[in-house]
Amino acid sequence: MNVHNAQFTGWRWQSHDGAFQTMRRLIVNPSVERLHTPVLLQEVLDLLRPRPEGKYLDCTVGVGGHAEAILERSRPGGMLYGIDRDAEAVALAREHLGRFEGRVTLVHGDFRDVNRIATEQGWGSFDGVLFDLGISSHQLSDPERGFSFLHDGPLDMRMDRSSVGKTAAELVAKLSESELSSILWKYGEERWARRITKAIVKAREREPIVSTRQLKELVEKSIPRPAWPRKIHPATRTFQALRIATNDELTGLGLAIEEAIGLLKPGGRIVVISFHSLEDRIVKETFRRLHQAEQPSLHLLTRKPLVPSQEERERNPRCRSAKLRAAERLGNP
């Protein structure tokens, strides 16, 4: 979803108006930078085309990095409406975007309920909609959230800790070996899924697997050292797969995108950033179906997905898998 990197030395933001100031503040304010450096920011702004008096919906607002840039670009009267399923992220975004008082409305909720939320809140229609899928840096950097193997913490992985949903530890404890293997293969594309799940099942017979350290060490021992990936930690795919399963991230994604498109004004634009091949496939197929319908409701702005530049990948290694697709709402849906 969002990535961060502390190395900005020598980099200049090639843009104009508020976008430069946004990135400058990210550079000089370590606390903000630590939480969020928005991915493909210039591409998002170029495609959304924020304008004064425009209305924009960020369906995955996180701590507000993209939202801040949209608000800067849409001065003086542009409005930003944000949704996030992580209550902690919403609280951080309110603080981060506090200087835009009167122009920001944030709601704790799931983007799969975007139509209901927008209707209940009376938001009306929008000039632009953004989805930035995946996981954010503030979630990864907090050991208590359990998303990262870099720090020991509880194996939680819930994006919304206020919910009653199962944690990753509960999935690891209760799912059968075949179910776990299927999750690692489907969502993580992990070639060693069977060996890893065999090790998990054997280990949980001795003691509960409740920490990120336990899971990381199991994965490390399951994959032969010469077969470890060169560019990522061997536990990366396992953690990704369990996170997607814990949060049921792919279910309803296509419908949510379609509902968000329905909230666009004619000529309004939607931008979606994905970080997983299955996410990108859902976005691609949803856009194409609405574009190729007998009465099309979308015009595709990106025939092929946009990806981060080499410079951005070097600054922010976590953005390497990002893909951006965009489309414009036609006048006669």
Image (cartoon, rainbow, N blue to C red):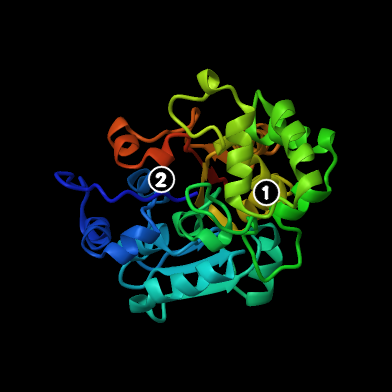
Q: Is residue 268 visible from the viewing direction of this image? A: yes
Residue 89 shown left or right of residue 8 in the figure: right
Q: Residue 36, percent across and down?
A: 39, 57
Q: Residue 96, percent across and down?
A: 38, 71
Q: Is residue 333 visible from the viewing direction of this image? A: no
Is 79 located above or below residue 329 in the figure? below
Q: Label 2 neighbourhood size at 10 Å, few (<14), some (14-19), many (20+)?
A: some
- Of badges 2 and 1, the one in the foreground is 1
Among the two numbered marks 2 and 1 on one chain, the one whose residue lies closer to the N terminus:
2
Q: Seen from this angle, which residue lies furthest bottom?
A: 102
Is 158 located above or below residue 314 in the figure? below
At horizontal 33% and vertical 46% (from top left) the residue drawn is 42
Q: Residue 249 carries which label?
A: 1
Q: Return the residue nearer the eye: 250 or 256.
A: 250
Q: Residue 271, percent across and down?
A: 50, 47
Q: Residue 116, percent across and down?
A: 71, 67
The three-letter code of the residue at mark 2 reads Leu
Does the residue at mark 2 contact the one at mark 1 (Cβ under 8 Å)?
no
Q: Return the residue nearer the eye: 266 or 257.
A: 257
Q: Distance between the residues labelled 2 and 1?
A: 25 Å
Q: Return the residue nearer the eye: 311 or 70.
A: 311
At horizontal 41% and vertical 49% (from top left) the residue drawn is 3
At horizontal 71% and vertical 57% (from top left) the residue drawn is 167
According to the picture, the residue beneath numbered tag 2 turns out to be 47
Give the secondary structure at mark 1. Answer: loop
Give the secondary structure at mark 2. Answer: helix
Q: Seen from this angle, which residue lies furthest front?
A: 206
Q: Label 1 neighbourhood size at 10 Å, few (<14), some (14-19), many (20+)?
A: some
**The quadrant where residue 52 appears:** bottom left
Q: Seen from this angle, which residue lies furthest top?
A: 226
**The quadrant where residue 98 appears:** bottom left
